[in-house]
Image (cartoon, rainbow, N blue to C red):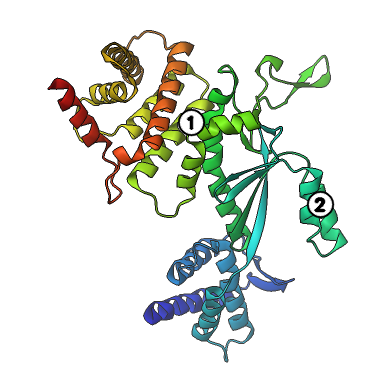
């Protein structure tokens, strides 16, 4: 550890020497932020590599960003440049490391959402993430804990009456943003995945961070020597997901909150990772425009949920596995198997550029429901598909079931 720190200190001194000897380079400290100016991006790549190396060496990636550590490195460079004969990098680096070791600031992050409408539910907990309707009472509760009137007004100006995701994060501001967005991503995937089962199948989800969705943006055009805005069809306006008490009950039945618990865990079992990966691909299908691409994403979701140890015959394995899990009798199992095999045939023709039957809206809806039902079964019957040491054993379960049926 000490040797690595010494190597980093020498690297800092080497970079400082280059900056010090560059007549165009200028270092300044303005309101606590150090700026390197006059040289464009000349030293930025090396500075970032150095800062990232310091960050990795210190093991602070869970609470600090490269930007934050970069400021610490620049402060060391500035101090050496100001006192080149009396200051060395190593003791300054050790001081920086000690301060970063003890860095512990907790922030509550608020992220505005679009495409979500909370009706008779004021808040909903998904592990570390809380969706809030942001009623006047909820805003007043936050504002009441703020010290200055200026901060109170700023919060009320920024936080309007739209749903927000609230989460507490122990990190500096930039890293806190990254962590918050990453945590929210799993929740948004779950909401997009569930939307067709809580609403009309025809609805197009547009669930995202407010300002990041790009549905039907206005376009500028010139007509008859006048400027006009063009908008997409009002028939295809993005749809909001309504979260009501009834919807929450359906979400519970679908295993939504259990999946959200999976997403919030640091260490996940194989089953939890497979379920989340399946949900991510099902969510991805919701964002695709063409039926072909929707189905491709849903088949990948299916294969995530029903992995096979076989080197070939994926379509047979997946279709038979889904049939065993979903079919109630021989007739319904054959129906499920044959439908999935037919969809695989269509998919293969898409992938390999051959002629194929058109993938229909009904194909997508049926496969989406199949994926949804499989996820619900895997979550509810988890103990049957997971070994005591956390391995995902659904492949063994399916093999045993096939042997039992053959017998």
Query: Which residue of the protein is positioned furthest toward the left in this rendering?
Result: 407
Quote the CA–CA distance across marks 2 and 1.
37 Å
Look at discs 2 and 1 and give the one toward the viewer.
Answer: 2
Does residue 246 appear to the left or right of 259 in the view shown? right
Q: Residue at x 46, y 22 (%)?
A: 294
Coordinates of residue 373 in the picture (x, y in percent)? 42, 26
Callout 1: helix, strand or loop?
Answer: helix
Which mark is drawn over residue 140?
Answer: 2
Horizontal side, residue 123 vs residue 198: left or right: right
Q: To which quarter of the image does residue 306 belong?
A: top left
Which percent across, then down, holds residue 11?
46, 75
Residue drawn at (56%, 73%), measured in percent from left and top? 73
Quadrant (top left, top right, bottom left, bottom right) of the C terminus:
top left
Q: Earlier in the sequence, mark 2 or mark 1?
A: 2
Direction right: furthest residue: 149
Residue 378: give x, y in percent of width and height.
37, 34
Task: Check the image and report above or below for 307 versus 112.
Answer: above
Q: Residue at label 1?
A: 284
In the rendered view, would you say 167 is above or below 27? above
Secondary structure of the residue carrying tag 2 is helix
Q: Quadrant of the N terminus?
A: bottom left
For image coordinates 66% across by 66% down, the residue present is 37
Compared with residue 228, is residue 387 higher up or lower down, i.e. above or below?
Answer: below
* Label placed on residue 123: none
Crowding around mark 2 (Cα neighbors within 10 Å: few <14, some 14 to 19, many 20+) is few
């Amino acid at each position: 550890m000490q040797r690595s720190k010494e190597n980093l200190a020498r690297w800092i001194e080497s970079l400082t020497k280059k900056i010090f000897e560059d007549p165009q380079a200028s270092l300044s400290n303005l309101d606590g932020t150090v700026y390197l100016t006059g040289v464009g991006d000349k030293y930025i790549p090396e500075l970032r590599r150095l800062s990232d190396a310091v960050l990795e060496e210190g093991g602070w990636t869970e609470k600090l960003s490269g930007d934050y550590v970069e400021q610490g490195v620049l402060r060391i460079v500035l101090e050496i440049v100001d006192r080149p004969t009396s200051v060395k990098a190593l003791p300054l680096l050790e001081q920086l490391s000690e301060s970063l070791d003890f860095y512990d600031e907790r922030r509550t992050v608020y992220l505005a959402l679009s495409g979500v409408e909370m009706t008779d539910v004021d808040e909903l907990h998904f592990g570390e993430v809380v969706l809030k309707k942001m009623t006047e009472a909820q805003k007043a509760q936050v504002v009441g804990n703020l010290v200055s009137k200026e901060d109170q007004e700023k919060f009320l100006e920024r936080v309007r009456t739209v749903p927000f995701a609230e989460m507490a994060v122990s990190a500096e501001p930039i890293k806190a943003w990254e962590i918050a967005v990453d945590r929210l991503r799993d929740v948004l995937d779950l909401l997009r995945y569930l939307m067709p089962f809580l609403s009309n199948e025809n609805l197009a989800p547009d669930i995202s961070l407010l300002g990041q969705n790009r549905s039907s943006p206005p376009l500028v055009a010139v007509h008859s020597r006048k400027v006009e805005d063009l908008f997409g069809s009002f028939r295809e306006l993005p749809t909001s997901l309504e979260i009501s008490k009834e919807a929450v009950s359906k979400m519970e039945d679908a295993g939504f909150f259990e999946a959200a618990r999976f997403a919030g865990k640091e260490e996940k079992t194989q089953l939890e990772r497979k379920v989340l990966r399946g949900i991510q691909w099902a969510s991805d299908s919701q964002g695709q425009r063409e039926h072909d691409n929707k189905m491709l994403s849903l088949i990948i979701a299916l294969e995530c949920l029903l992995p096979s140890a076989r080197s070939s015959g994926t379509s047979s394995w997946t279709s038979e596995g889904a049939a065993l899990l979903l079919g109630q009798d021989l007739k319904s199992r054959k129906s499920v198997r044959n439908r999935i095999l037919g969809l695989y045939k269509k998919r293969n023709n898409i992938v390999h550029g051959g002629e194929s039957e058109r993938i229909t809206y009904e194909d997508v809806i049926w496969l989406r429901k199949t994926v949804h039902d499989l996820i619900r079964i895997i979550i509810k019957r988890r103990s049957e598909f997971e070994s005591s040491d956390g391995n995902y054993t659904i492949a063994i379960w399916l093999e045993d079931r096939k042997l039992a049926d053959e017998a």
